[in-house]
Image (cartoon, helix red, strand yellow):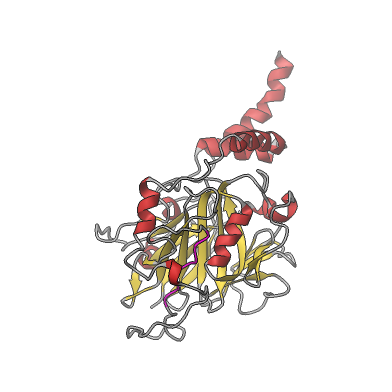
Amino acid sequence: MGILVLLLLPVTWSYGHALGAAGNTASSVRSVEWLKDHHFTWLVNDVENFWYTHHKPKKGGAPTGGLAAAIRSGASSTTSSTLAPSLEPTPPTSVPAAPTFYGGPLPRPQPIRSIVANPLPGEGDWSPLGQPVGGIPAMYASYIRPDPVYTSLVTGVAWIDPHLARFSLFAGVQEPGGRDWHHQAPMGSADRADLVAAFNSGFKLKDSEGGYYADGRTVRSLRDGAATLAISPGGVPSIGQWGRDLTMGPTVAFARQNLSLVVDNGRPVAGLNTDSNYKWGATLGNKVQVWRSGVGMTANGALVYVAGNNLSISMLASVLARAGAIRAMELDINSSWVEFVSYGPAIPSAAMPDAKLLPDMSGGTSKYLGDNSRDFVAVFRRS
């Protein structure tokens, strides 16, 4: 008995240390992460695969509750998506006068062409999201059903104009590790004053098959061929394949890699439905539908973020391409890690509150303001 106690002491200490570590991650999630970090990934994957395989969404049907309302919110903002023959943005008839930020604001995005044969009113249309910059919307939101079979599902899309907003990569209190990052959780009051949005980054670095670079420091080496979100010193994002579209130089202030591109040349890449965990990082199986997120770059430089529940990797890539992404990458997966928040003024305002992109995203809107465990992307107004 005494020998058993001695053997269990290191395990108990390790598990207790994981539960008590800094960060705002729930204890249930910490337990799963501890199992994965201690050679029990196979057990977690088996349990998750069983659960998700037996809890697939029903086929057919229509969105309900807050998701249905989200689709309708765009109905009066743009013309119907059934009238949009092209995915490429076209200049509006007029652009409101505004300060010149990196050449002026981009044209408002065109509606997203529906994936489902009979689109709902407002599906794929765009509504202004969050705080305007210089009186002009810097972000828009759209909602689309991601699959013609599972028609009750809704995926959220956020479109962000880098001429009006600047981007930054924030280190979490646990990921990527280390201290004294220039941008690190918790977010300071000076940053909060200009904050308009924040969203999740990629997998834990050990699972990302890629690297992390910020503040002139490399936590993990950047891998040639990896899908990469790079941000310039001026806060302009780029997405591409490292070594082909992006390379290290003075135009790179931040670089975060995760797996391989899921959209290239404006189309979903081949092989998304294969069971290649190395390439796509689908620890639950590529065809299993879970919370997923991704980010892409349009031809005119806008950034599009996509997230939703019950998404396969191919569904995610399809929505990113339909939203105009010419290159795109998967970010994090599973409900605990997928979240996009738009922020109102630092002084709370009932007219423009903080809000999640989708009402069923987990966690609260203050997640990225406190001791967030993992790194994330923050979006600020330009001035």
Residue 59 picture location, percent across and down: 53, 43
Residue 207 seen from this side: yes
Foreground: 157 or 301?
Answer: 157
Kindly identify the residue that appears in the image at 47 percent across and 75 percent down. 162
Residue 42 located left or right of residue 333: right
Residue 231 located left or right of residue 378: right
Say which quadrant the N terminus sits in. Answer: top right
Residue 186 picture location, percent across and down: 45, 55
Foreground: 204 or 244?
Answer: 244
Q: Is residue 1 magenta?
A: no
Examine the image and state in which quarter residue 98 appears: bottom left
Q: Which residues are magenta?
A: 108-115
Kindly identify the residue that appears in the image at 74 percent across and 17 percent down. 3
Residue 6 picture location, percent across and down: 70, 22
Report the label total: 0
Say which quadrant the C terminus sits in. Answer: bottom left
Foreground: 98 or 358?
Answer: 358
Residue 376 located left or right of residue 212: left
Residue 202 seen from this side: no
Residue 87 picture location, percent across and down: 52, 73
Q: Is residue 109 magenta?
A: yes
Q: Pick out the residue farthest to the top.
A: 1
Kindly identify the residue that appears in the image at 35 percent across and 85 percent down. 94
Q: Main secondary structure of the magenta part?
A: loop
Residue 291 located left or right of residue 10: left
Foreground: 122 or 50?
Answer: 122
Q: Pick out the residue farthest to the front.
A: 118
Query: Looking at the image, is 90 positioned above or below residue 350?
Result: below
Query: Looking at the image, is 369 positioned above or below residue 251?
Result: above
Query: Looking at the image, is 177 positioned above or below residue 261?
Result: above
Query: Looking at the image, is 364 positioned above or below residue 5?
Result: below
